[in-house]
Amino acid sequence: MHITNIHQAKTQLSKLVERVLQGEEIVIARAGKPVAKLVPYERPVQSRQGGQWRGQVAMEDDFDELPAEIATAFAGEQP
């Protein structure tokens, strides 16, 4: 973790952001006391809800089932 003062943070913000992108945490201090921390941004994981297309998509009668190895791959399983 790197500690810098506000003046240095203002003049070297681009360099500090590059360090954060490399995984380093940067603490910004005022009068020697930590007041803020720069950390990499983590996108929130949004769960997908089923049924959003219900009633809008139809399975045709001539649709062939997926081969087992493809179906297991879609399920995240190893063949």
Image (cartoon, rainbow, N blue to C red):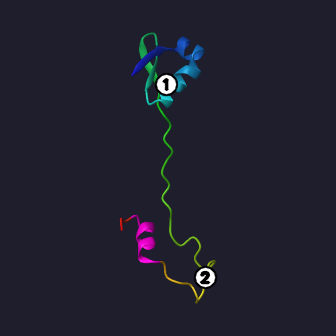
- Give the main secondary structure, helix, strand or loop, of the magenta stretch: helix
Which residue is drawn at the image coordinates 48% and 28% (left, top)? Answer: 20
Q: Position of residue 30 (x, y in %)?
A: 47, 13
Is residue 47 magenta-colored?
A: no
Q: Position of residue 44 (x, y in %)?
A: 49, 47
Q: Position of residue 18 (x, y in %)?
A: 53, 26
How many numbered discs? 2
Specify the quadrant that holds the C terminus: bottom left
Q: Earlier in the sequence, mark 2 or mark 1?
A: 1
Q: Secondary structure at mark 2?
A: loop
Which residue is drawn at the image coordinates 45% and 10% (left, top)? Answer: 31
Quarter where residue 59 is shown = bottom right
Question: Considering only vertical position in the picture, is 45 above or below 6?
Answer: below
Q: Which residue type does callout 2 highlight? A: Ala
Crowd band around label 1 with a 10 angstrom C-alpha radius: few (<14), some (14–19), many (20+): some
Is residue 75 magenta-colored?
A: yes
Residue 19 numbered tag = 1
Question: Considering only vertical position in the picture, is 21 above or below 49?
Answer: above
Asked if disc 2 and disc 1 are in contact, CB closer than 8 Å, the reply is no
What residue range appears in magenta? Answer: 67-76
| Residue nearest the viewer, comparing 67 with 53 | 67
Q: Which residue type does callout 1 highlight? A: Arg
Q: CA distance from mark 2 to mark 1?
A: 50 Å
Residue positioned most to the left: 78
Q: Position of residue 17 (x, y in %)?
A: 54, 26
Residue positioned most to the bottom: 61
Q: Which residue is mark 2?
A: 58
Residue 48 numbered tag = none
Question: Considering only vertical position in the picture, is 43 above or below 24?
Answer: below
Which residue is drawn at the image coordinates 55% and 11% (left, top)? Answer: 7
Q: Secondary structure at mark 1?
A: helix
